[in-house]
Amino acid sequence: MTAELQHTLAKSAGFSGTSLHTGEKVTLKLQPAPVDHGIKFKRKDLADEPTIDANVANLKTVERATTIGEGAVRVHTVEHVLSALSAMGVDNAIIEMDA
């Protein structure tokens, strides 16, 4: 997709709360990203802050929630934030989380 047709966020936005399935406290921060970056989840709570591309190749489970992962790193219930970004036409974003 050409740069002119891609969209990111105008500024950062953050949320804090309790994870639906794990009950853990979590803070999620949506960050703008450059052209051709795609949407990536960044685990700020883990060593080296690994990132996971939000694409079907990284799909791990879909039972009761959509989980993506790379290696041993997982992100659960991604469908809600991905749906919101898709509805807004966002192609490039970094989704940082601390749990």
Image (spheres, rainbow, N blue to C red):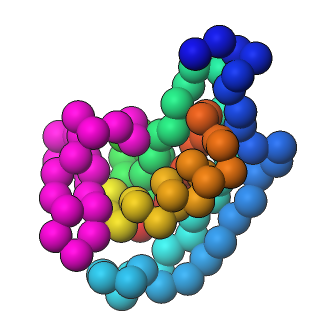
Q: Is residue 31 left or right of residue 59?
A: right
Q: Residue furthest right?
A: 10
Q: Is 63 covered by the magenta stretch? A: yes
Quarter occupied by residue 35: top right
Start and end of the magenta stretch?
53-74
Image point 76% across, 52% down: which residue? 12
Q: Is residue 28 left or right of residue 76?
A: right
Q: In the displayed structure, would residue 34 be above or below residue 55?
A: above
Quarter occupied by residue 71: top left
Image point 30% across, 81% down: which residue? 22
Where is residue 42 drawn, in percent x and y?
47, 46
Where is residue 46 drawn, in percent x and y?
37, 52
Q: Is residue 85 left or right of residue 65?
A: right
Q: Is 77 covered by the magenta stretch? A: no
Image point 41% across, 67% down: which residue? 99
- Asked whether residue 44 appears in the rendered view, the answer is no
Q: Considering the image in quadrants, where does the N terminus appear? A: top right
Where is residue 9 drawn, in percent x and y?
75, 44
Image point 82% across, 47% down: which residue? 11
- Asked whether residue 6 appears in the rendered view, the answer is yes
Quarter occupied by residue 19: bottom left
Q: In the displayed structure, would residue 87 be above or below residue 56?
A: below
Q: 48 or 59, which is in the foreground?
A: 59
